[in-house]
């Protein structure tokens, strides 16, 4: 290929920061900075004029503002988000071989938008861009006083978080949305991290039971209902806490059930679940060979990066952190992957200040609700944020799971047709006849769409929730990372009950990481935690190796093991820090339940716990730990 | 065509009422009647297996229940409804030559469904079906006591309308939705009609201003905002009325601003606008040659029949009425047509107990917000329930309207391309260059999509709002109908401000109708009313002829004329009834504003008004009325 044809192929379009843009004749009430006009129509027009075979878009370094009002719109079902009409200036739909290079630019978004929307695209690279929102999706207020006689605390709220009080309920009002005080947590502004033991104070018990209800319990239903939909969630509840304004920017919050939040802490909240995950920074569906590189995400109204049903994804140099006095970066996970395959690589990145996990990689469970004929089942989406999720394409393998017998599929079938009847209920027809053992209530998962995963040179700090959750039966390596998270640093889970995230582990290694002061938010959990929603005598997590890691922990419990088989914990060093007082001083260093053939060897314990290993009667393990008491 | 091939062509599928249907193994909490299992999957499967070239479905006479849980789902933008994922057992998409004959069956729906969803279909007939909902979308309670010292009234609520009280707000709870007390009105159960002078008592002023607000007014906006979206509508408001339960099924409602509703009246409400128009009985889009015949609609959570962008529609023998103690039939208009063409025929029908108009036929205005190049404009949907409305297809004519100069388009252009960028903002490119006179703020309307209309042998009674609204420049005939509506029986309107419904009249005749006791709800309007949103000296309604009608009216005003030219009112008889006390006894029989060349001749006045015609200075008319005082 000659240089000429190369340059034609990679058509380069440079956007100039101060180009004249003639839609500005619209009247607006926005007080404009020198360069904060809407660039959406211009950028959208360029994206839409690119050939689908590819190209490159580069930006002159600068600040670009994007508004939803004249943005491209598309309805999207997005895993673990509200399903919605999303708006974007970058609808990267059905593209191949595309590079977007921000050249260090900052893109500032306004309202409910998705900065980068990728669907059915292949070989895409997005790099050198900082993503931020002018008005954030969360709100925050500083605890400044206690009134113990009234069981109330005062909260100081800055002008960046406008509010109004409606019948005692504090509502934060934004340009394109509003939210209440729900899903809040304390941050410690000095540490710029989740507050130590925040669960003593949060979440606030904002709602209580209604006092009058008539006939509601007699309403008939033909089918099961979902208590987590907005319709059922709010039923029977009313506000039990209330808020009064003391003076502009200072409110008093009454009637907390928990301890009054410590003075100096910052209460940060994103409102109830109905619209607090609506604007992820990157959203991928049915994509392949996607790389994002050298990206900053200062804020997003949802996850930083959410990929559904995609293949070979690389995140390199993604920094997620809050800035400019904000406590919160992304209002949900930093990165999240559902039903992905190929290899997921996350490296050289740092994830801070999120309101949820750092990395979460899993498949989806769906529940069999009907056996329609010899080849066809009807399935129900378990979690309301999985609505519309198409679990498989023609030719892919579906595993039938009976959790009473095994965490792993007992049979695989080949998908002939998936019929999405409605967003909650799909029909799936298989090439093969259904086995006799299939029954209503069993689960299905896609056994083809499981990824190999490598996560290294990353930092997971100062966020709510976990560092890394990976559920995949393929090769998973997590190494050379640093963790300091308010819940468990790593979480192995079979989430068949609430989230319907399919999980297991069979080739998982964790090595050369540092875990420093995790689980400080008040959960009684291990730094590394294994968990199944249903207590089960079966083994879900096989052959996990945890070696050569350093644990520096203010509290005792490092490992919380359940349902594991052949786990190796070797060559790790453990010491106790004085960062915080211990929250659960009676816990041992390691707890073991319903597990077998665990090996603990050549570890160094320099901590202050009084008990090393506490195992239930059914578990088996070997250990060369010396008693901590003797040290 | 032989009998054999005929019967093959019209494939007949009979559904047997008691056929065994094997999905019933799903656990459910519904207490089942003998035949109230869900027939949706079975019917859906039959509809989907029909050839698109047509066929016939007949039902054995009986009661069929339909639930949304396993129904077909499709996102629909529906004019004057909430845009939504709709569910249906009858997705009549892309069909030709289809007949559905209920043979007198009753279809009972549950929750948010559209009984008949027709898109891109042609030559469809649906007949002999009664449509009802198990649990209605409205709620009602009887006024049983006054407590004047507390400014409160008591309301008795039956078990059919379960409720709970959340922080003083009464919430009616249903199987698939809930609603508050908004959009309520009084019915008189004895007359089974809207209560006389209900506007003295309703709508209730449920909301007042919030007492505390901080920074909200300083929120910046780049583009105009819509005060009628949920985001802005509720901003700055809180509940000012409150409700307490006295005993189960009896609540006390405090703090009304208006007079206490009379004891014995029934308060019926459908909740605020965010979700009170979600389940119309018939929804058509881009259809042609559609007939519905001998249909009863006992209830619907929206309109009875809403057609967008369709052609040649016949409604014959449609009876809409509430039954079984319910006050409300459809929670919105009986029938509504937007951007339709060809001929609309409505005959032999009766429309009662709706919460909105009987017939409303109009086009849509959209506002020019950008001039993008010599051929292209950007337009904004004016009303939030017009989101996503595609005003024209390639080749259709768009009229440019400057209401400061004329109610009629000053130029027509041919659509080359419509680009629906997002649901609020579309781009339209024309074959011709834009004229120099085009300007931001002007309106557009589709001049091809205007229908000929004939409405006869119909009854419009006992509903909230109007009887017939038709805005079309083509031939319109309304004759041999009976009207008794709580607002104007007929309404001529240019609704450019709020509803963005385009309107005019140029060949409109009203004859041989009876208008008996209309406008009894408390509006100070004429039985036949002309109105433009903006006071204008221009003429919108040309050549309207009103003749040989009988007006029997408890009040004085028959005609409220504005912006009319060449109106003829001839051979009508008018008398006064004693049904109600007059509400506006100082009004004359006819008021005239901003009109010219009106003729009143050979009418008979046997009423009791003291003044016949009150005209403004600019209007011109001739009349042979004798003074009513002399009679």
Image (cartoon, coloured by chain):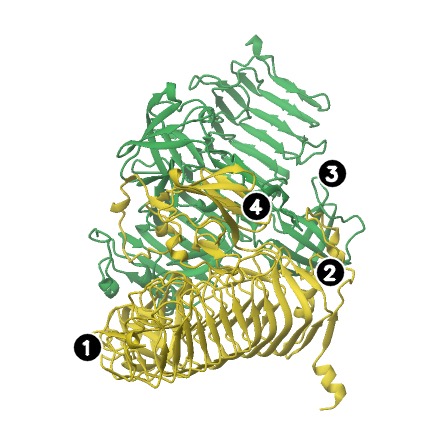
Chain colours: A yellow, B green
The residue under label 2 is: B431
**Mark 3 or mark 2, which is nearer the start of the sequence?**
3
**Mark 4 or mark 1, which is nearer the start of the sequence?**
4
Residue A512 screen position, x and y as percent? 45, 82
Q: Which mark is residue B404?
A: 3
Foreground label between 1 and 4? 1
Q: Quadrant of residue A116?
A: bottom right
Relative placement, left or right, of A139 versus A393 is right
Q: CA distance from mark 1 to mark 4?
A: 56 Å
Residue B216 screen position, x and y as percent? 59, 43
Q: Quadrant of residue B579?
A: top left
Image quarter of the C terminus of chain A = bottom left
Q: CA distance from mark 3 to mark 1?
A: 86 Å
Determine the residue located farthest toward the right in the rendered image.
B436
Q: Callout 3: residue from which chain?
A: B
The residue under label 4 is: A162
């Amino acid at each position: 290929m000659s240089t000429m044809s190369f340059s034609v192929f990679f058509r380069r379009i440079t956007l100039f920061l101060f180009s004249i843009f003639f839609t500005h004749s619209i009247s607006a009430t926005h007080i404009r900075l020198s360069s904060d006009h809407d660039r959406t129509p211009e950028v959208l027009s360029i994206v839409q004029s690119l050939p689908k075979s590819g190209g490159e878009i580069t930006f002159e370094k600068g600040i670009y503002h994007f508004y939803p009002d004249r943005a491209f719109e598309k309805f999207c079902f997005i895993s673990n988000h509200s399903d919605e009409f999303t708006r974007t200036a970058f609808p990267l739909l059905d593209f191949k071989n595309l590079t977007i290079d921000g050249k260090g630019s900052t893109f500032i978004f306004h309202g409910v938008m998705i900065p980068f929307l990728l669907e059915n695209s292949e070989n895409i690279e997005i790099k050198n861009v900082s993503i931020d929102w002018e008005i954030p999706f969360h709100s925050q207020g500083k605890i400044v006083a206690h009134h113990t006689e009234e069981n109330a605390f005062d909260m100081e709220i800055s002008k960046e978080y406008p509010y109004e009080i409606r019948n005692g309920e504090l509502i934060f009002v934004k340009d394109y949305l509003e939210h209440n005080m729900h899903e809040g947590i304390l941050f410690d502004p000095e540490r710029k991290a989740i507050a130590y033991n925040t669960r003593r104070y949060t979440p606030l018990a904002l709602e209580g039971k209604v006092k009058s209800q008539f006939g509601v319990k007699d309403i008939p239903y033909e089918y099961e209902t979902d208590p987590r939909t907005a319709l059922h969630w709010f039923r029977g509840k009313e506000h039990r806490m209330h808020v009064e304004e003391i003076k502009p920017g200072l409110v008093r919050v009454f009637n907390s059930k928990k301890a009054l939040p410590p003075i100096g802490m910052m209460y940060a909240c994103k409102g109830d679940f109905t619209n607090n995950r609506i604007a992820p920074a990157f959203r991928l569906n049915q994509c392949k060979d996607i790389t994002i590189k050298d990206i900053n995400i200062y804020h997003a109204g949802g996850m930083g990066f959410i990929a559904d049903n995609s293949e070979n994804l690389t995140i390199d140099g993604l920094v997620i952190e809050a800035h400019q006095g904000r406590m919160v970066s992304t209002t949900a996970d930093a990165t999240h992957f559902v039903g992905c395959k190929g290899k997921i690589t996350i490296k050289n990145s740092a994830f801070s200040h999120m309101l949820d996990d750092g990395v979460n990689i899993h498949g989806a469970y769906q529940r069999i609700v009907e056996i329609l004929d010899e080849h066809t089942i009807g399935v129900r989406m378990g979690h309301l944020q999985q609505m519309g999720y198409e679990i498989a394409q023609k030719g892919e393998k579906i595993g039938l799971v009976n959790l009473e017998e095994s965490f792993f599929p007992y049979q695989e079938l080949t998908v002939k047709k998936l019929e999405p009847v409605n967003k909650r209920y799909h029909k799936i027809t298989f090439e093969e006849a259904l086995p006799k053992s299939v029954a209503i209530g069993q689960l299905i998962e896609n056994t083809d769409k499981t990824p190999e995963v490598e996560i290294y040179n990353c930092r997971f700090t100062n966020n709510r929730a976990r560092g890394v959750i990976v559920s995949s039966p393929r090769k998973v390596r997590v190494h050379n990372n640093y963790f300091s998270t308010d819940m468990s640093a790593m979480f192995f889970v079979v989430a068949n009950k609430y989230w319907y995230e399919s999980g297991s582990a069979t080739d998982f290694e964790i090595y050369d990481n540092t875990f420093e002061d995790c689980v400080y938010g008040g959960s009684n959990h291990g730094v590394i935690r294994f968990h199944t929603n249903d207590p089960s005598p079966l083994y879900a997590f096989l052959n996990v190796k945890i070696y050569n890691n350093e644990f520096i922990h203010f509290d005792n419990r490092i490992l919380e093991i359940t349902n594991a088989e052949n786990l190796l914990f070797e060559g790790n060093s453990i010491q106790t820090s004085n960062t915080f007082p211990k929250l659960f001083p009676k816990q041992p260093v390691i707890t073991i339940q319903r597990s077998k053939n665990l090996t603990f060897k050549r570890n160094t314990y320099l901590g202050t716990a009084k008990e090393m290993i506490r195992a239930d009667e059914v578990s088996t393990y070997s250990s060369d730990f010396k008693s901590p008491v003797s040290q």
